[in-house]
Amino acid sequence: MFRYTFLVLGTVFLVSCAQLGSIVQSGSTQNEEISPFASEITEEDILNQFSDVPFPPDTILDLTKSVVVGAEENWFGQIFFNSNRSSNEVFSYFKDHMPDTGWFLIMEQQGNQIFLVYEKDLRVAIVNIARKRAGSEAILAVGPRAQ
């Protein structure tokens, strides 16, 4: 199982060539005109790019670490995020809501860190949740399933 996990994570690193931060508009410089109709992209807009994964409420993305290729239901990569909710609440949220978007639970493990492994079509998703004093840290890695 660990070899399978490392294979998936290795594949994710190889196929990940675009950073999630590139989705976010860069700030304007002094020479640029700002359109009164332009709207700022929010974290909610970014999270909506990944419609096949339900993110818990109070999710705060770490765009400096996250690396993603694609969007909608055809993306691969790693999304790092923090939550103001406890690790048990984040675990319960994923366990309750991932099946709603077509993901099937393959494995779960709880200890100092929590792991959930899901499968959908030709992809595998690994949710790694770390306990913190206040809230939790998590990594969602999605990659192609080994054939």
Image (spheres, rainbow, N blue to C red):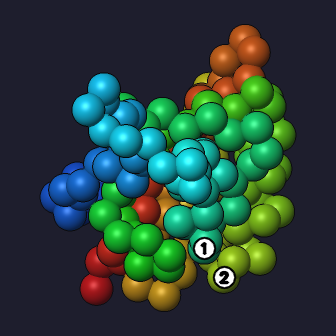
State yes or no: discs 1 and 2 in contact (Cβ < 8 Å).
Answer: yes
Q: Image point 79% across, 45% down: which residue?
A: 57
Q: Earlier in the sequence, mark 1 or mark 2?
A: 1
Categorize mark 1 by other alpha carbons within 10 Å: few (<14), some (14-19), many (20+): some
- Residue type at numbered disc 1: Asp
Residue for badge 2:
102
Categorize mark 2 by other alpha carbons within 10 Å: few (<14), some (14-19), many (20+): some
Q: Image point 39% across, 54% down: which residue?
A: 23
Indicate which disc residue 52 carries: 1
On screen, residue 105 versus residue 16, left or right, reads right
Give the spatial CA distance, label 1 vs label 2: 8 Å
Percent of width and height locating residue 113: 59, 32
In this view, 134 is above or below 147: above
On screen, residue 83 versus residue 25, left or right, reads right
In this view, 89 is above or below 54: above
Percent of width and height locating residue 1: 40, 59
Q: For residue 105, what is the image quadrant?
A: bottom right
Q: Image point 82% across, 62% down: which residue?
A: 96
Q: Image point 55% across, 38% down: which residue?
A: 61
Asked whether 140 or 75 is in front, the reply is: 75
In this view, 142 is above or below 38: below
On screen, residue 19 versus residue 80, left or right, reads left
Q: For residue 66, what is the image quadrant?
A: top left
